[in-house]
Amino acid sequence: MKINDTQIKQVNNQIRRLIDADNFYGRKLREAGITGIENADDFENLPFSQKQDLRDAYPLGLMTTPEEEIVRIHSSSGTTGTPVIIPYTAKDVDDWGIMFKRCYEFAGITNKDRIQITPGYGLWTAGIGFQYGAEKLGAMVIPMGPGNTEKQLQMMTDLKSTVICATSSYALLLTEEIEKRGIKDQVCLRKGVIGSERWGDKMRARIHDGLGIELYDIYGLTEIYGPGIGINSTEDSGMFIWDDYIYLEIIDPVTGKNVPDGQLGEIVITTLVKEGAPLIRYRTHDISRIIPGKYGDIDFPRIDVITGRSDDMMKIKGVNVFPKQIEEVLATFPELSSEYQIRISHLEGRDTMRIYVETDGTVNFLDMADKVAAAVKSRIGFTPLVKVVELGVLPRSEKKSKRVIDERYD
């Protein structure tokens, strides 16, 4: 998928604005003597931007419009490092709402739906993005925000919510609570729009079967607009990306070069029309692939589900390990739930990886631990310590689940 002529003109407009604003990227361009691009090769030679660039610009160094045109700021949800502050103009906010409305429409959600929103509000982009898109759609919004599961379930049953918007972790928690209370027959949900964290097939099946709803992956990140820059229309369609607002590349995370369509790599995003804080070739560290070809008569490009991040690698005993590798091994055991936790420690001069998994009382916990440990060793090359616990023991989250805890640097 190559950048087209319309997108090249949009990028050139952004280049002029960035140079005029003299922000970090504008200075990069000026130092490189770049005032515009003519073709795809020129575009792919533009420098990348990264999260540290955005942190270094704190608090308002990303602004490319006069301050009086900024109507809102948002900040990334990360808890480490300097916050990233993203300014939005009124047009940016409206564009985001239009994209999110499109997401709902692609998922078959209409103005007759009642949409219960559980992600957080405030500096984080999640809750308010889900809400604004739903209001543009004309649907009834139930803006719950996170937590207070008792109230969530009361509103869900009393108001007969038909759509739930949530992280996969909270959707799982709600699924389990509904089953525990025996109130599934009082729930009118038909669809779930799930985002903000990667989730595996086992968790997807658990939520789908437990609630009996269709599930849709939504994509986005605060640095770009927030959630809503892409969604799937059916389970097997891949996620459509709104390339009239953003241009997406997939690169080799080591070489920085574009990879062929269909090959896994790191997602890189350019905002084509954003005013408050445009970004060119922003490295997201999310791993996916462009799905070749069209889906029916839809012209938007598609990416596959997010499989992980290029920066979530753990180095243990000299071996590079990704959480997804562990998740794929655990998924081969039907006796295990979708939930797991990895803890890495440094004890008596050596690294130790402990994996906690859940199962019901129908299996021998010690035998299961041995089987899981052997399967993980065959995949990553060393034997972890495996602890099997009862179903429901591992923590459930109202936001994102923390599955990897590295205690070596505490």
Image: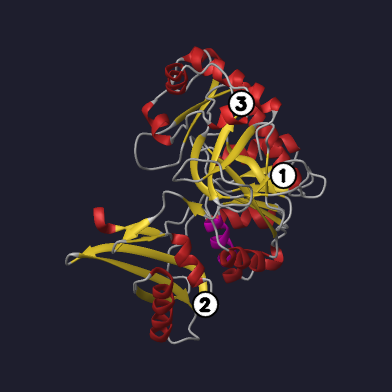
Q: Position of residue 384 (x, y in %)?
A: 34, 72
Question: How far separated are the C-alphas under marks 3 and 2?
Answer: 46 Å
Q: Residue furthest front?
A: 41
For label 1, count other residues whose C-alpha is less than 10 Å away and answer few (under 14), some (14-19) or many (20+): many
Which of the colour schemes (rainbow, by chain, secondary structure, one colour) is used?
Answer: secondary structure
Query: What mark, if any, has residue 92 been given in the picture?
Result: 3
To which quarter of the image does residue 154 belong? bottom right
Question: How far separated are the C-alphas under marks 3 and 1?
Answer: 19 Å
**Is-magenta flag for residue 171?**
yes
**Is-magenta flag for residue 306?**
no
Residue range highlighted in magenta: 168-176
Query: What mark, if any, has residue 104 been given in the picture?
Result: 1
Residue kind at label 3, given as amino acid type: Asp
For mark 2, give the secondary structure: loop
Q: Is 267 on the left or on the right of 22, as rendered?
A: right
Q: Position of residue 119 (x, y in %)?
A: 55, 46
The residue that mark 2 highlights is: 333
Q: Is 162 on the left or on the right of 131, as rendered?
A: right
What residue do we see at 43% from left, 35% from top?
A: 51
What residue do we see at 51% from left, 28% from top?
A: 46
Viewer-side residue, 207 vs 269: 269
First in residue order: circle 3 vs circle 1: 3
Residue kind at label 2, given as amino acid type: Phe
Question: How far separated are the C-alphas under marks 2 and 1?
Answer: 34 Å
Above or below, 244 relative to 140: above
First in residue order: circle 3 vs circle 2: 3
Q: Is 345 on the left or on the right of 65, as rendered?
A: left
First in residue order: circle 2 vs circle 1: 1
Q: Position of residue 84 (x, y in %)?
A: 43, 32
Viewer-side residue, 340 vs 237: 237
